Image: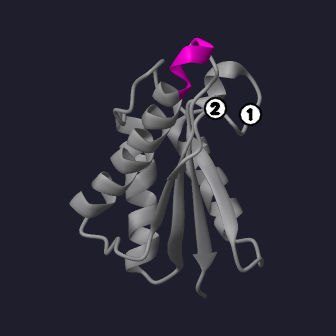
Amino acid sequence: KTLAERVADLEDKVNFHHPKTEVSGLNNFGLGKAELDESAKEYLKTLANKVRNKEIEILEIIGHADISMPKNEKVTNEIVSLQRAHAAISYLIEEKIETAGIKITGAGGTEKYGEKFKNRRITIIVKKLN
């Protein structure tokens, strides 16, 4: 999807009337990589603006990994998934967002989502404020 389509999806998801909404949109990671690409940064910048405008509160950032690593490297998947969550929270800090209350988790390859490469992702749990 294009960045504009991903941002539109974000708008739709955040407008749910549920107290908590899962926003998954950051799945541009290479195997074993945790660096954010430009589209991921734009996506996070959109979230940061919503936080600044008091539309949402970010509750949790969960990093994920696929299961491409050999079984004896399970720890690597857990580390990479946590590094992905850290990359997102670090970017939010660069955007001057208060992150003290945001929980970060590395799920490793335990939560499968579609095709294998799509598991190289970040899930963000937000609460709609208004």
- Residue 18 vs 75, above or below: the answer is below
Q: What residue span does the magenta drawing correspond to?
A: 70-74
Q: Residue at x 64, y 32 (%)?
A: 109
Instruction: Place residue 116 in its image quadrant.
Output: top right
Q: Is residue 28 visible?
A: no
User: Considering the image in quadrants, where does the C terminus appear?
Assistant: bottom right
Asked if residue 43 is among those painted magenta in the image, a careful observer would answer: no
Q: Are marks 2 and 1 in contact (CB under 8 Å)?
A: yes
- Residue 91 vs 97, above or below: the answer is above
How many residues crowd mark 2 within 10 Å: few (<14), some (14–19), many (20+)?
many
Residue under label 1, please give it.
Answer: 112
Q: Which residue lies most toward the front here?
A: 72
Q: Depth check: give the residue in front, 9 or 129.
A: 129
Q: Nearer the viewer, mark 2 or mark 1?
A: 2
Q: Which residue lies most toward the top here?
A: 70
Q: Depth check: give the residue in front, 78 or 52.
A: 78
Q: Amino acid at mark 2?
A: Gly
Q: Depth check: give the residue in front, 93 or 43.
A: 93
Q: Residue at x 36, y 49 (%)?
A: 86
Disc on res. 109: 2
Instruction: Place residue 101 in its image quadrant.
Output: bottom left
Instruction: Label 1: state its secondary structure.
Output: loop
Q: Residue 69 appears at what percent x and percent y? A: 56, 15
Q: Residue 123 appears at what percent x and percent y? A: 59, 50
Q: Main secondary structure of the magenta part?
A: helix
Q: Is residue 52 visible?
A: yes
